[in-house]
Image: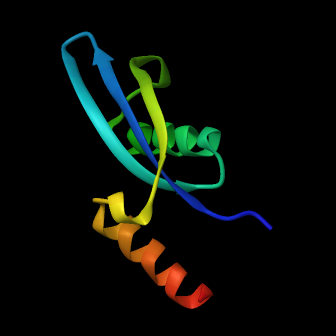
């Protein structure tokens, strides 16, 4: 059985009139799944097409390093039930 991990995805959005760096924390099984989730979320919330998104780094992080309150709550609740 696979364990869900938390990944921090860092990248940039490069549109003709807009440029910004983003940092998202997502729960996924593999880094590839985390990247897909970031593409889907940015595309749906901010209307950014995949060619305008450049992923710079994908890193697995420990529960202590999580800054997103929703991801933190989900992860810590899951750990509580597993033990």
Residue 6 percent coordinates (x, y): 50, 56
Q: Residue furthest right?
A: 1
Residue 62 percent coordinates (x, y): 45, 59
Q: Quadrant of the C terminus?
A: bottom right
4 with respect to 67 (left or right): right
51 vs 72: above or below:
above
Q: Quadrant of residue 63?
A: bottom left
Please tell me how many numbered marks the rendered image carries. Answer: 0
The residue at the point 31 percent across, 16 percent down is: 14
Q: Quadrant of residue 13?
A: top left
Q: Quadrant of residue 67?
A: bottom left
Q: Which is nearer the eye, 80 or 20?
A: 80
Q: Quadrant of the N terminus?
A: bottom right
The residue at the point 25 percent across, 10 percent down is: 16
63 with respect to 32 (left or right): left
69 vs 40: above or below:
below
Q: How is the image coloured?
A: rainbow
The residue at the point 47 percent across, 17 percent down is: 51
Residue 42 percent coordinates (x, y): 39, 39
The residue at the point 67 percent across, 65 percent down is: 3
Residue 12 percent coordinates (x, y): 32, 24
8 vs 18: above or below:
below
């Amino acid at each position: 059985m696979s364990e869900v991990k938390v990944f921090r995805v860092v990248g940039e959005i490069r549109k003709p009139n807009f440029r910004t760096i983003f940092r998202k924390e997502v729960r996924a099984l593999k880094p590839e799944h985390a990247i897909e989730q970031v593409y889907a979320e940015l595309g749906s919330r901010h209307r950014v097409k995949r060619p305008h998104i450049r992923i710079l780094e994908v890193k697995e992080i420990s529960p202590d390093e999580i800054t997103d309150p929703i991801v933190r709550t989900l992860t810590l609740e899951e750990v509580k039930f597993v033990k």
